[in-house]
Amino acid sequence: MVKVINANPGQVWLVVGGPLTNAALLMVPASCGCAKTVGRLLAQAKPAGITVYLIGKRGEARYLTALAHAARAGSAVLAIDNENVLYPAYHAAGLTLLLVNSEGTVVAVPRPRASFRLQAWLRP
C-alpha cells in the first residue's frame, strides 16, 4: 500500500518517491460501482506503460483490493490517502481521475466513464 504525503493542484507526491510522471491516479469512493470503468482504465494503461494508482480514503483498503480484483484487466498500485490531502486538493466528488503526463502536468477528469480514452489525455 502506498501513502499519499502531499497533494497540491498540479503536483502529487507519494511515499514511493517524488513527483509522478506517466501515471493515472483514480480516486475511488467506497462502493462506487465502477469496476467496468476501472477495468477499462487498467486495460488501456498496461500496453501504454502507465502506472495506475487506485486511491481510497482511510479504512477503504479492503474495498480497493476487491475492486482491483473485480476489474481483472491489469494491475494497479493501491494507495490510501490517510491524511485526506488528495481529495480536497482536487475537489474530488465521486470517481475522479488524475492524469499525470510525461512532463508531470496533472489534469483532473471528474467522473470518467467506461468509454474514457486514456492515451489522448497523456500526451504532453
Image (spheres, rainbow, N blue to C red):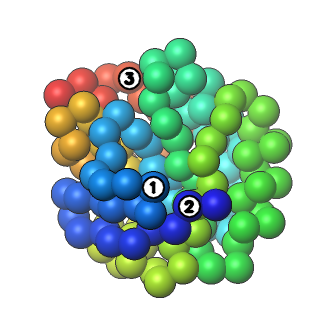
Measured along the vertical axis of the image, is residue 103 above or below residue 105?
above
As shown in the figure, which amino acid type bears the numbered disc 2?
Answer: Val
Element class at badge 1: loop
Q: In this view, does 18 lie to the left or right of 50?
A: left
- Residue at position x 58%, y 53% in the image: 54
Q: Nearer the viewer, residue 18 or 110?
A: 18
Q: Which of 70 and 14 is in front in this view?
A: 14
Q: Where is residue 35 in the image (x, y as percent from the top left)?
A: 72, 45
Q: Do the residues labelled 1 and 2 touch (CB within 8 Å)?
A: yes
- Residue at position x 53%, y 49% in the image: 53
Q: Do the residues labelled 3 and 2 touch (CB within 8 Å)?
A: no
Q: Where is residue 15 in the image (x, y as percent from the top left)?
A: 44, 63
Q: Position of residue 25 (x, y in %)?
A: 46, 50
As shown in the figure, which amino acid type bears the numbered disc 1?
Answer: Val
Element class at badge 2: strand
Tell me the quadrant of the picture where the N terminus can be found: bottom right
Q: Residue 16 carries which label?
A: 1
Q: Is residue 23 visible?
A: yes
Q: Which residue lies furthest to the front in this view?
A: 17
Q: Which of marks 1 and 3 is in front?
A: 1
Q: Can residue 91 be seen in this view?
A: no
Badge 3 is on which residue?
Answer: 119
Task: Estimate how packed mark 2 is, as few (under 14), some (14 to 19) or many (20 or more) residues with alpha carbons within 10 Å.
Answer: some
Badge 2 is on which residue?
Answer: 2
Tell me the quadrant of the picture where the C terminus can be found: top left
Q: Earlier in the sequence, mark 3 or mark 2?
A: 2
Estimate the spatial distance between the alpha carbons at disc 1 and disc 2, rounded to whole Å: 7 Å
Q: Locate residue 104: give its quadrant.
A: top left
Estimate the spatial distance between the alpha carbons at disc 3 and disc 2, rounded to whole Å: 24 Å
